């Protein structure tokens, strides 16, 4: 998750001035009136159903007026739904489409004004960047509307960066605490297994006859009670600490990558596959030699 949050800081926090939504949280009546001629009556109704009048009794006017001082001087509307259930997303998206269209128009107008002397070499170049440029157009339009309502864009940007950075720090701290606890649990579990095995083995050896002692030798039995059981202890520790953790990390990486960019998920999938192949090859090479060392010990 941490690289994902870092990319949000760069892409949204810095490049988009902390504006992370396609639709403005607050929109003025003058903006809607300016583009109402480009919408049908039904589309205007759809857009207005997404917003509530700023003076509605259920709206926290004091907080909004601090963030958008301009609402005191012009009639404005606030977005009703910032958090939607999955089943509501489709309906919301359909209602928002006319507003997205006029936001894109406004954004491209602003971008054209800002880059009057910029050259686009060809239609092909424009088309290759169309998705990115459309997203930037949304951001430009929302940013311009926020500025017209007196919002402090720098404050919005700083708030987003600090919030996202704080989330990263929180996740890192949780990860550190989890790592410490996992290591503690793994060590205690491995030590507990070794204690029981060593106890059982010691009781078994106490019941050996003289002939059995001569067959194994005292030195060999001591080695079995110390080195061999230590190897079992290390195996249990590594199984808990690594063998469970590594597959979770690999699977989680693939799921996270697929959620952000499905076209790139194959890259992490390939990396995980190569890593597994390397581990298997190393095991095939190392295990026979490891057995020889243990036999010599």
Image: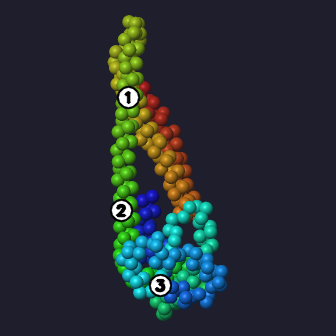
**Quarter of the view holding residue 212:** top left
**Closer-to-camera residue (200/211):** 200
Could you tell me which secondary element the residue under label 1 belongs to? Answer: helix
Tag count? 3
Q: Nearer the viewer, mark 2 or mark 3?
A: 3
Quarter of the picture holding the N terminus: bottom left
Q: Could you tell which of marks 1 and 2 lies nearer the N-terminus? A: 2
Residue appearing at x 38%, y 81% in the figure: 69
Q: Residues within 10 Å of mark 1 (few under 14, many from 20)?
A: few
Against 267, residue 59 (above or below) is below
Instruction: Residue under label 1, please give it.
Output: 192
Instruction: Residue under label 3, please give it.
Output: 75
**Closer-to-camera residue (288/273):** 273
Image-based side of 18 in relation to 123, left or right: left
Instruction: Residue under label 2, please give it.
Output: 166
Given the current orientation, which residue lies at the most extreme top position? 210
**Closer-to-camera residue (159/230):** 159
Against 133, residue 93 (above or below) is above
Image-based side of 23 in relation to 174, left or right: right
Question: Where's residue 234, x and y in %?
Answer: 39, 34
Q: Nearer the viewer, mark 1 or mark 3?
A: 3
Could you tell me which secondary element the residue under label 3 belongs to? Answer: loop
Could you tell me which secondary element the residue under label 2 belongs to? Answer: helix
Say if residue 118 shows up in the picture: no
Quarter of the picture holding the C terminus: top left
């Amino acid at each position: 998750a941490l690289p994902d949050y870092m990319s949000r800081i760069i892409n949204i926090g810095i490049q988009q001035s902390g504006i992370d939504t396609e639709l403005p949280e607050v929109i003025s009546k003058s903006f809607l009136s300016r583009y109402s001629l480009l919408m049908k009556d039904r589309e205007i109704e759809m857009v207005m159903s997404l917003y509530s009048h700023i003076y509605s009794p259920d709206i926290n006017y004091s907080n909004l007026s601090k963030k958008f001082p301009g609402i005191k001087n012009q009639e404005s509307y606030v977005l009703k739904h910032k958090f939607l259930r999955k089943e509501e997303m489709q309906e919301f998206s359909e209602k928002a489409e006319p507003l997205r269209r006029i936001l894109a128009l406004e954004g491209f107008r602003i971008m054209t004004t800002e880059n009057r002397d910029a050259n686009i070499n060809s239609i092909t170049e424009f088309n290759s960047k169309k998705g990115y440029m459309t997203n930037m157009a949304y951001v430009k339009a929302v940013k311009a509307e926020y500025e017209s309502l007196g919002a402090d864009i720098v404050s919005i940007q700083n708030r987003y960066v600090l919030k996202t950075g704080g989330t990263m720090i929180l996740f890192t701290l949780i990860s550190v605490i989890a790592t410490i606890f996992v290591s503690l649990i793994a060590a205690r579990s491995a030590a507990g297994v070794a204690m029981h095995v060593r106890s059982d083995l010691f009781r078994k050896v106490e019941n050996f006859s003289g002939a059995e002692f001569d067959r194994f030798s005292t030195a060999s039995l001591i080695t079995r009670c110390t080195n061999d059981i230590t190897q079992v202890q290390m195996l249990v520790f590594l199984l808990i600490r690594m063998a469970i953790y590594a597959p979770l990390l690999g699977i989680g990486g693939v799921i996270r990558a697929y959620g952000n960019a499905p076209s790139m998920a194959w890259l992490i999938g390939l990396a995980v596959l190569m890593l597994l192949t390397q581990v298997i090859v190393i095991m095939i090479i190392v295990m026979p030699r490891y057995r020889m060392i243990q036999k010599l010990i």
